[in-house]
Image (tube, grey):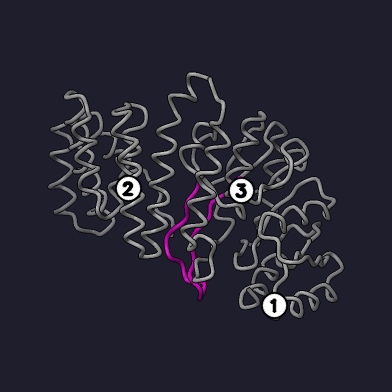
Amino acid sequence: MDKYVEYALLSVLRQTFQDWECIIVNDGSTDDTEKIVKEYVKRDPRCKYVYQDNRGLAEARNAAIKSSTGEYIAFLDADDLWEPDMLEKTISYLDANPDVSIVSGGWDLIDEQGERIFRKRVARSSVSLEKLLLVNRFPVHAVLVRREVFQVCGPFDPDAVNDWDMWLRAASNGFTFGYIEDLIAHYRRHAGCVTVDIDLMRRRHLYVLDKVFRGENDPKMVELRPYAYILCWLSLADYCKEAKRYVELGQCIEEAEKIYSEVGYSRKYSTLIEARVESLPHNEAFLERIYLSLPRIWRWEAYTRRFQKRAIAGYYGKDYVTLVCNLLPAIILWPPRGLWYIKRLGLRRVWD
């Protein structure tokens, strides 16, 4: 990670909010990371260096928390970046909202050269345990957390998708989440990312859900359980798609379809599942199963969503013939949803 660590440190040093301490944990690196980091430690007394034998990302974060003294805690991996006003905006938010314990902000994906891969993403609604189980909504470097969250929830779990697991524990313990729409962080995708290790991600994702649902008897959680696993498998399929591992992708889709065949249609969750399946290759069989499971009254709406998505693609691609040809049938088939998309096309922000 010595290729990127200096950029990460510079993004900390350039923060507009300057009353911070930076705990730099070297998790047994064998490259030039230590040499680079020690230069920054000499240069700025706010930087503190901690070395440990390689124990993994979760234990590195736990070591940083133990060595820190601040009221608020943020995380930045060696290959990621913060916007200069990341701390200023998130700290201002928590100071103004004492009932909120975790605040997230907008983030985007960049490549090895720092070029943007896709535009900013941000959670634009309140975060709950149910929503966190269905979608891991934000990366750890786009978050600021009150120290009390870790005092109550304990350390990161090295066997889990450790940030997702932590947010689930925080929600279970009654901590509230907030969000700001501003872009505050950049997540770098490169060959060394842990997300490329599909086998590891599979074990860790399923482990998190097994922890949450083990011994759970609440009727709402029992209903949610199979759909959480379906969406987990589809998330893993996304990782396989990015890594171009199409055999594993097909296996993930098969696992998701197997669970869906047992529980069937849910007005609450099937639309979300359908949207995730549509973004994947080799999805025809699963999509057909979803459509056949829909009550007849909702099938028109399902077909309408296909027209709407093509209309959105035409809008952003400036192909207005495609936009009109797909938006008109959407309105005819399902007027409420069609009109909603007209409003969305007119009001939605485009993040550059």
Q: Which mark is residue 281?
A: none
Count of all numbered marks drawn on residues in the image? 3
Which secondary structure, mark 1?
Answer: loop
Q: Amino acid at mark 1?
A: Thr
Residue at 16% across, 24% down: 296
Callout 1 crowding tier (Cα within 10 Å): few <14, some 14–19, many ≥20: few
**Quadrant of the rendered image containing residue 344:** top left
Q: Earlier in the sequence, mark 1 or mark 3?
A: 1
Residue type for callout 3: Asp
Report the predominant secondary structure element of the magenta stretch. strand
Q: Which residues are magenta?
A: 104-122
The residue under label 2 is which amino acid type? Ile
Residue 336 position by quadrant: top left
Q: Along the line of sight, which residue is nearer the eye, 71 or 91?
A: 71
Q: Which residue is mark 1?
A: 30
Q: Nearer the viewer, mark 1 or mark 3?
A: 1
Q: Residue at x 70, y 73 (%)?
A: 29
**Circle 3 SS class:** helix
Task: Kindly indicate whether the residue at mark 2 contacts the one at mark 1 (C-beta within 8 angstroms).
Answer: no
Residue 112 percent across, percent down from the top left: 51, 73
According to the image, label 2 marks what residue? 253
Q: Which of disc 2 and disc 1 is earlier in sequence?
A: 1
Furthest-top residue in this view = 219
Residue shown at 78% from the left, 56% from the top: 63
Q: Which residue is mark 3?
A: 163
Left or right of 285: which side holds 226? right
In the image: residue 249, left or right of residue 50: left
Does residue 262 appear to the left or right of 33 in the view shown? left
Q: CA distance from mark 1 to mark 3?
A: 25 Å
Q: 343 above or below 88?
A: above
